[in-house]
Amino acid sequence: MEYMRLKLSLPPSVNWLYAGKVRRYKADKYKEWIVTAKRELLTQTKYKIHDTEWLEVRYAYYMPIYNKNWTKKKIDVFNYEKALSDFLADNIQGFKDEHIKQGYVEKHDSEDRYVIIFVKELDAIKS
């Protein structure tokens, strides 16, 4: 099976997904990103996950990773994964985040802020 490839705008960090203290709800920033990501998804190849037990997901984050003095920014890319896996589960037929068996993350220095997501169905016997 080949990788499915999607390019989406970078979501808000998990720290900014929800608002409210007593009753949590999706923050405005998060809702805006979902609308943008859905629009972006419409311009790309439509994918469907078949009835598979396991998935491999690779996230390639593109964002500024250095400060002006060339010191590294403190960026925890894992804080973006929650919004992305939830979005994929809601918008890619057959994608279930509990089926992610292998996950990989990398970050690249870029002025633009986006993520390339690669999803591959794993053969249950070989995984």
Image: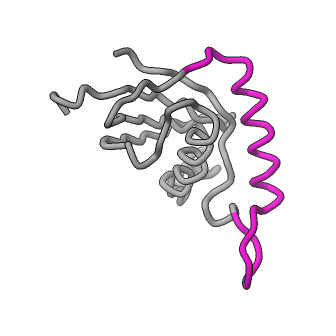
Instruction: Return the residue found at the far left.
Output: 126
Task: Give the vertical position of 40 relative to 24 (above or below).
Answer: above
Residue 125 image point, x, y percent: 16, 29
The way the protein has been coloured in the rendering is: one colour
Question: Is residue 62 shown left or right of residue 27?
Answer: left
Residue 115 falls in which quadrant of the image?
Answer: top right
Residue 35 image point, x, y percent: 80, 40
Q: Which residues are magenta?
A: 18-47
Instruction: Return the residue found at the far front.
Output: 51
Question: Is residue 118 shown left or right of residue 62?
Answer: left
Residue 71 image point, x, y percent: 52, 54
- The quarter of the picture where the C terminus appears is top left
Residue 41 image point, x, y percent: 69, 26
Task: Give the vertical position of 81 relative to 74 (above or below).
Answer: above
Q: Residue at x 43, y 39 (%)?
A: 106
Q: Residue at x 61, y 61 (%)?
A: 14
Q: Residue at x 62, y 14 (%)?
A: 45
Q: Residue at x 32, y 36 (%)?
A: 53
Asked if residue 37 lies in the magenta stretch, the reply is: yes
- The quarter of the picture where the N terminus appears is top left
Asked if residue 10 lies in the magenta stretch, the reply is: no
Question: Is residue 14 shown left or right of residue 19?
Answer: left
Residue situated in front as seen by the camera: 54 or 33: 54
Number of numbered callouts drawn: 0
